[in-house]
Image (cartoon, helix red, strand yellow):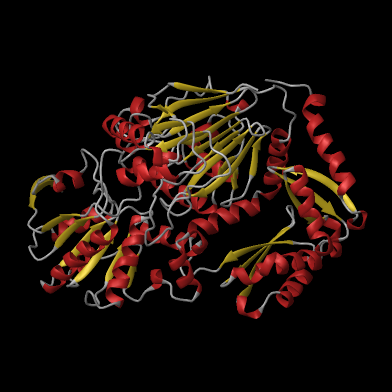
């Protein structure tokens, strides 16, 4: 829909008039810009910024917008002079490498890499504000991780090269977000595009009279042979990408983010919102998907160029940070406890018209890596909740850890090799923490733990963002006790002699892929399959049709084609499967979440589950919310939609 520019400008003009009345003249305002979800005040008197911090906060609260202060280009110190001043202002214990201070002259930002980035921020952000006031450059602290992430370096380098475009993009988005609300809204519609009555290809379209937002856009990797089942039911012509306000990604698993690059191939140039860890992990996972399918002789309908475009248009969001994504929709992300950076999405629609909470994938109990999912929100009318294990109860975390330790101990005593196929994101890092602690506490003897595959790059991202991990793990890393850099871990990269590695006995090998669909884990299995002393331990879900599932279900011979000859490999090692390490909530936790969520929703929509899980979960919560002790004053509507069904959440005013 094309709207006259004078109508589009009305809301922004009103905001500018309000700001001009409130901004202290002493700041010497140069300009007001709408950059993405932020309203940016460019000021000539940088030294006055610290004096008026409370005033700026009060203005932001009054207009209910994110207001940022930047020094105008003419008010900034030259980069070399600014660097000297920054090194004077930052506490020495931050351990800043002077060579890692990088200036983005277009956005007026200075990236400062430090071993302790919190020291750059200071209590109440005071040091960060002093740097801005003294130099005119807005500091962006970054962590100097002991495990350097190649992907993060690539992303930041591209951001710097494209900073002029990024500024143009943010200002386009700012104009769209802060446009005037034309229609008096009285409805919200949720349409199931993928991940309903199934697991995989998650996608939800949320529409109001004013806005259209996509929640996730994933791919079902296990169904790539059948495009009708692999991709969400999204007609790219019908969805009109130029009218899409935003894409919001809950986390980096491919069934939630894997198709977003396709939007950019078809011309979408709007924002994608996600946390910073999700941005980096999504780039790793989607890039790997592109490369693997290409090696297998198959093509995806998008490529690396489209992935790069997606990353360029990503706007990172912090937990608990209210962000405007459309003129009538505010987004807040909360910890989901699923994987690093995973988020529960809260949408505040139409100045209180309706509030949606979308859990994405979540874990409602604490794990070694992450604190449990958030269950308290400002307002909730509709809850969209995953139901993956709606019909299943899981083994306790403690029992799962003890089972793993017992298997490892017995295998070490036999001088065998423990092969643990793992998912690169989340599961690999959690098993690393469990094994390292088991050695430190002398529950198992010290042995080499070889790490190979995508796990290494993903682990580097974890070390970049300890603030997203559990409090206990975060505090340990801040104390300098980083379990991911333990001497017991042997990082394997590049060309390696895997036959030599399996000769190091006893030892542990962690490698991708977690379902034995390819990757180094399959090569290691071939090398040790016939060894009765060794063990194969599954710590994650094994999908139907995968080699991992077949072995788990009892297959004990593998047929290989080697140099044109068919070879049969017998599996003589011990095979174990541990079900308690899941990043999803089981049936008990799902019901507990529905009972504990505050405030109580009046609509509950179930998704991300097979039909049996959905219907079982629906029956359970239907009974649970009728209990007088449940906290529900009225029984909520429970919806179990299928693909392409819409739920109209009509609100009368």
Is residue 448 left or right of 410 when viewed as pictured? right
Q: Which residue occupies 89% across, 45% down?
A: 21
Q: Is residue 232 visible?
A: no
Is residue 366 left or right of 401 when viewed as pictured? right
Counting the numbered discs, the total is 0
Residue 219: image location, x then y, percent: 39, 36
Q: Quadrant of the C terminus?
A: top right
Please determine whether, in this image, residue 195 is positioned above or below residue 372. above
Q: Is residue 649 visible?
A: yes
Q: Residue furthest right?
A: 25
Using the image as rendered, state which of residue 175 and residue 123 is in the foreground.
Answer: 123
Residue 181: image location, x then y, percent: 72, 27
Using the image as rendered, state which of residue 623 and residue 389 is in the foreground.
Answer: 623
Residue 300: image location, x then y, percent: 40, 35
Using the image as rendered, state which of residue 505 and residue 2 is in the foreground.
Answer: 2
Q: Quadrant of the N terminus?
A: top right
Is residue 502 left or right of 312 when viewed as pictured? left
Residue 279: image location, x then y, percent: 52, 49
Q: Which residue occupies 44% across, 46% down?
A: 252
Q: Which residue occupies 45% across, 35% down?
A: 384
């Amino acid at each position: 829909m094309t709207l006259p520019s004078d109508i589009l400008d009305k809301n922004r003009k009103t905001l500018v008039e309000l700001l001009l009345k409130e901004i202290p003249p002493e700041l010497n305002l140069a300009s007001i810009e709408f950059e993405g979800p932020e309203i940016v005040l460019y000021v000539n008197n940088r030294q006055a910024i610290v004096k008026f911090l409370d005033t700026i906060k009060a203005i932001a609260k009054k207009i209910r917008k994110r207001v940022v202060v930047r020094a105008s280009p003419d008010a900034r110190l030259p980069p070399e002079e600014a660097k000297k001043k920054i090194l004077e202002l930052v506490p020495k214990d931050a351990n800043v490498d002077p060579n890692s201070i990088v200036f983005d002259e277009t956005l007026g930002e200075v990236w400062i890499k430090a071993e302790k980035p919190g020291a750059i921020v200071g209590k109440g952000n005071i040091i960060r504000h002093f740097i801005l006031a003294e130099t005119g450059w807005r500091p962006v602290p970054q962590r100097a991780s002991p495990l350097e992430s190649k992907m993060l370096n690539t992303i930041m380098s591209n951001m710097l090269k494209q900073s002029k475009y990024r500024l143009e993009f943010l200002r386009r988005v700012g104009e769209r977000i802060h446009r005037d609300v034309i229609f008096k809204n009285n409805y919200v519609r949720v349409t199931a595009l993928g991940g309903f009555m199934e697991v995989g290809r998650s996608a939800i379209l949320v529409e109001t009279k004013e806005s259209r937002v996509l929640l996730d856009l994933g791919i079902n990797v296990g169904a790539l042979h059948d495009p009708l089942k692999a991709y969400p039911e999204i007609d790219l012509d019908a969805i009109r990408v130029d009218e899409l306000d935003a894409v919001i990604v809950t986390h980096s698993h491919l069934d939630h983010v894997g198709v977003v690059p396709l939007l950019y191939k078809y011309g979408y140039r709007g924002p994608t919102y996600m946390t910073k860890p999700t941005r980096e992990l999504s780039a790793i996972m989607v890039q790997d998907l592109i490369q693997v399918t290409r090696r297998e002789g198959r093509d995806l309908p998008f490529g690396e160029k489209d992935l790069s475009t997606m990353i360029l248009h990503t706007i990172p969001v912090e937990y608990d940070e209210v962000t405007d994504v459309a003129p009538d929709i505010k987004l807040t992300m909360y910890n989901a406890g699923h994987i690093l950076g995973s988020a529960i999405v809260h949408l505040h629609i139409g100045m209180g018209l309706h509030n949606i909470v979308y859990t994405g994938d979540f874990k409602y109990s604490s794990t070694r890596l992450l604190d449990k999912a958030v269950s308290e929100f400002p307002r909730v009318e509709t809850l969209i909740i995953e139901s993956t294990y709606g019909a299943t109860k899981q083994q306790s975390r403690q029992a799962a850890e003890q089972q793993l330790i017992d298997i490892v101990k017995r295998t070490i005593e036999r001088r065998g090799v423990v092969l643990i196929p793992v998912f690169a994101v989340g599961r690999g890092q959690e098993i690393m923490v469990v094994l390292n602690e088991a050695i430190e506490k002398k529950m198992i003897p010290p042995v080499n733990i070889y790490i190979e595959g995508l796990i290494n790059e993903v682990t580097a991202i974890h070390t970049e963002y300890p603030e997203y991990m559990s409090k206990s793990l975060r505090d340990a890393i801040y104390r300098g006790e980083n379990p991911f850099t333990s001497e017991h871990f042997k990082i394997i990269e590049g060309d390696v002699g895997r036959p030599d590695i399996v000769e190091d006995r006893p030892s542990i090998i962690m490698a991708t892929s977690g379902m034995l669909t390819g990757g180094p884990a399959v090569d290691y299995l071939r090398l040790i399959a016939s060894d009765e002393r060794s063990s194969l331990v599954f710590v994650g879900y094994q999908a139907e049709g995968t080699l991992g599932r077949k072995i788990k279900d009892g297959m004990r011979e593998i047929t290989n084609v080697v140099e044109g000859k068919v070879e049969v490999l017998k599996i003589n090692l011990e095979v174990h499967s541990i079900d308690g390490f899941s990043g999803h909530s089981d049936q008990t936790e799902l019901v507990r979440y529905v009972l504990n969520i505050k405030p109580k929703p009046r609509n509950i929509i179930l998704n991300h589950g097979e039909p049996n899980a959905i219907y079982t979960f629906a029956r359970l919560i239907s009974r649970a919310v009728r209990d007088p002790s449940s906290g529900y004053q009225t029984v909520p509507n429970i919806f179990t939609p299928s693909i392409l069904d819409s739920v109209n959440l009509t609100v009368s005013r």
